[in-house]
Amino acid sequence: MDLQNPLFVSRYTQALNPVLNQGMSPYNARQLAINNIYNSLQIQSLMLAIKMILGYTLIIFLIVLVLIILLPSIRNKRRQRIVSKIGIDMV
């Protein structure tokens, strides 16, 4: 808990003041405010991890897609060179 960070302080007070106004004890109100901030931090880290995993998956998918598209044409060119050397028509 760093009270030097203005973003943390604003979120902490936004979570703390409504709970204190409901008549909860200061200790419980602090615990609920910290748990609220912890939960939002946990959700943000989960979203970041999902974003990274999906990004890597998309990159791998694009690489595989390019290979699938280019591999048959590379094989056909290789097959045509072999056929032209041998002189056999494969039709």
Image (spheres, rainbow, N blue to C red):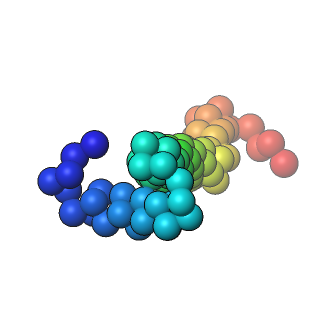
Q: Is residue 34 left or right of residue 10?
A: right
Residue drawn at x 42%, y 65% as measured from the top left: 17
- In the picture as drawn, the residue positioned furthest to the left comes out as 4
Q: How many marks?
A: 0
Residue 10 lies left or right of residue 71; in this view the side is left
Picture residue at 31% right of the left edge, 66% below the top? 10
Placement of the N terminus among the 4 image quadrants: top left
Q: Position of residue 27 (x, y in %)?
A: 43, 43
Name the one closer to the observer, 74 or 50.
Answer: 50
- Which residue shows up at 48% across the image and 49% down it? 25
Give the x, y percent position of residue 66.
Answer: 57, 52
What percent of the width, then of the height, locates residue 81?
58, 41
Q: Position of residue 9 (x, y in %)?
A: 27, 60
Depth order, front residue of 9/43: 9
Task: Name the residue nearer the viewer: 26 or 40.
Answer: 26
Query: Is 73 on the left-hand or right-hand side of 10?
Result: right
Give the camera-side residue of 41 and 30. 30
> Looking at the image, which residue sits at the far right?
91
Asked whether the viewer can see residue 58, the reply is: yes
